[in-house]
Image (spheres, rainbow, N blue to C red):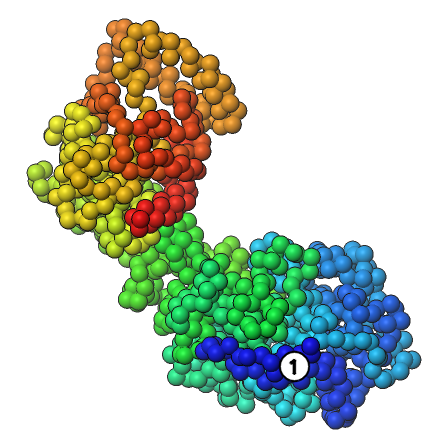
Amino acid sequence: MSERQVTHERNPTPTSETRISNPLDLRSLQELIHEKALLYPDKSALRFRDHVITYHKLNNSANQFARLLADYGIRKGTIVGLAVDRSPEMLYCMLAIVKAGATYLPLDPEYPQARIEFMLQDAAAAYLITSEKYSGRFQTAAKEILMEDLLRQAPQYDVSPPDAAITMQDVVYVLYTSGSTGQPKGVQITQLGLVNFLIGMLKEPGLDQHDKVLALTTISFDISGLELYLPLLVGAEVVLTDVQTSRDTRHLMEIVRQQGITVMQATPATWRMMLESAWDDRLPLKALIGGEALSKKLAERLLEKCDSLWNMYGPTETTVWATLKKINIDDEIITVGRPIENMFAYILDNQLRRVPDGTVGEIFIGGVGVGVGYLNRPALNEERFMPDPFSPLPGARMYKTGDLGRIVNGGEIQCLGRMDHQVKIRGYRIELGEVEHALGKQTGIKDVVVLPKDERLIAYVVQENGTLPNFSAWQQALKTSLPEYMVPSNFVLLPRFPLSPNGKVDRNALEAMGQEIEKANRVYTAPRTEQEKLIAKIWEDYLYVEKVGIKDDFFELGGTSIVAMQIMARIEKETGKRLPLASLFTANTVEKLATEMELDDQSISWDLLVPVKPTGTKPPIFIVNGLDMNVLLFNNIARNMEPDQPVYGFQPRGLNGVDEPFETLEDMAAEYIAALLERDFPDGYALAGYSYGGVVAYEMSRQLQAMGKKVKMLAMFDTYAYNKGHFETGVPKYIRKIKRQFPKFLFITQSLIRHPKETLDYQQAFFVRKYNEIAVYIGLQRPPESDRAEDKINEKYEAAYRKYHMQTSDACAIDLFRVDTRLYYLDDPLYLGWKPYALKGINVHDVKGDHKTFLMPPNDKDFAILLQQLVDERMKA
Ligand code: AMP
């Protein structure tokens, strides 16, 4: 079936984002150019410095080159590397390779040598056309052909087109995409894709024989195809720049003026530089922009200076540009418009279902421009190129772009940036593009890129000339439209952004440069009272921050649960005032903490139930503290769960040093339940406990069940359910103890091999503890005296645990989070002792870290994500 039939038969999918197809002119690129050469033989096809090459000359030379190349052995299917300087010969060669029915592999000689060699090898190029200047430079199996030889030999050949058997399915070029990570990969583009794209461009943005198109882009970037071929399809002129000129925007500006350029295509970065280059007047220029997000501000500036502005979008994999949009001055949202003819764009969810208009999903592109796939990358091809279920055509494929987008304005696509620019900061999912977009609108910011760093966002800013940075104003403005966690905390000012060879912002290079400007959202407010001065000083000592102002947020300054404990202990030492760690959740600034301290002791809240993160519409999860009594630890979990997930913690009675701690585990559970029921939480609880707290949560679940309340989730954060042994006496106890020595020894030996440092540290601490216990027991040492409330509670806790008779329960199945790094021996490493008790079963989840570190960065993130999934599932049931 011919493609002409294909497009006639296509029943255009009636979606808002699809354009109705027109029949294609299915002749090949070379035929179309040949036709124009016959029509405009003496017209200038190509201008390079002072040289003018007519259509006749260009076409004839390309034909002669093609015939000559055939004599070298280049034919249909041969891959030919092309590494020559920008020149008319470069274009002859590109056309000649295509005319010979072969495939060209564009190689910018300015690219690093190793990269060029990689591409030649990866593509298994049979030939490399280069010039004397580069002869022998590249280590390659490809046979070298010198441009100078071609120029010498070609005139002897016939000027008529060679008759290579061309089909529209032939691969016309293999282009290596930069591949932000890992090795670059070669995209194969067909004649059909290329011609369809060019014909689409002729309709919109449109071009005619009077146009002059500036060709400034490296041939290693697919968009150069538009600059070099499009003019040749209508009798227009290509004005080719050399490499120096293409890098110098002032020079480019001169050429635009002198040559009367009417169409120019560039990335936003290049356009921005052009605007800097003494461009005051309005030019009769059709400006094509693409390759990166176009900001509203840049659009406005360009619209002031150009006749029209077109935003073009598309990955290399779907042939240059797949969608486009003419930008108007009053466009509220900058979109990439609609697909070009015979191309489709879909916004899909992760199940590959279309999402409703306005909903964000991934952009998929279908249609005749979808490339054949990457060379020699079957696995990647399967992942990125897939059957197009929305196309009525058999065998149609679509490409997964990795870009986020949504449909707006009744059918236009708003591109929301790369999915791999989606980051998680403290558990919140953030589209960096959204933050960039919001910041880009602020006064004084010309250009901005936002990158994550150490759980914070850093904004790299190029300022408008002559403006002063105003970090706090920018942040304040952002806070009106974005949640707080999306507001960058630091700024780096740069004169310009580093660019990759194809003119896009080089994000990797950006990370490495620039001096961070002092934390911008810390508008320093000096402490006023003695109390504030003291607290600020203590925070400075423990947080390693030079100047802590009274409005600075403890967590934003990098405060962790361990630091919190140190700070509270120091405050107690200096002032005699004991404050609950949990107060930092609400009194999170020096100012608020000082106010809290001014309360009389009775009014300080030592509530058992601590609102770690009380906001959100999901059912809350309640987590019982472990022996460390540190509810602040649950902050890591709360921050890394979804923003909509409320988290509460329990902390024991007696922390204030006044109240008596619980005597039994049953009492503890009962009081926690009472605190829970005092508040108006809906029935159907999600309970969890860290270590010791798991047993308390277990007891709570039993008591709640007895009260007729439903527990929907019961999670153990690495809790061991060993209990029986506490009630053993005499011989059985000793037999059991002796029996476990051998496997214990084996375990410790293995652990020493796997985690030598951690195991030694653990064993050393264990021996010191045991030694002290024995020394006290035999009277060598006096029991340690401590007036720390925590030590007193600990003692009671251990006694309560020993007294606790664990019984079976069918209140709820147990979700057992088990750490993957175990530093001490356990009788039951599989179910951590829960098998006999959990009548409804146990779901085991392995998590990264040891018993202490699994709730701390960096492990806390994955842990929280898993926990969130489970809470969602269990609470739905
Ligand atoms: P490349 O394959 O080098 O052409 O890069 C394609 C990627 O560039 C797309 O997947 C987008 O992420 C980005 N891109 C291209 N054009 C635009 C545009 N007009 N607006 C936003 N992003 C774009």
The answer to which quarter of the image holds residue 197 is: bottom right
The answer to whether 382 is drawn above or below residue 357 in the figure is above
Q: Is residue 685 visible?
A: yes
Q: Residue sitting at 58 percent across and 63 percent down?
A: 386
From the viewer's perspective, is 744 left or right of 624? right
- Apparent side of residue 771 relative to residue 703 in the rendered image (left or right): right
- Residue 665 placed where, x, y %? 20, 27
Q: Quadrant of residue 437?
A: bottom left
Residue under label 1, please give it. 5
Image x and y of residue 16, in percent: 45, 78
x%, y% of residue 297? 42, 76
Describe the element under mark 1 as helix, strand or loop.
helix
Mark 1 CB near ligand 1 (8 Å cut): no
* Residue at position x 40%, y 75% in the image: 408
Quarter of the picture holding the N terminus: bottom right
Q: Nearer the viewer, residue 348 or 652?
A: 348
Label 1, residues with CA under 10 Å away: few <14, some 14-19, many ≥20: few
For the residue marked with disc 1, what is the amino acid?
Gln
Which of 838 and 610 lies nearest the eye of the viewer? Answer: 838
Residue 94 vertical placement versus 475 (above, below): below
Residue 796: quarter of image: top left
Q: Nearer the viewer, residue 297 or 395?
A: 395
**Image side of residue 808 versus residue 349, left or right:** left
Tell me: residue 135, above or below residue 158: above
Q: Residue at x 67, y 89 (%)?
A: 234
Q: Is residue 273 visible?
A: no
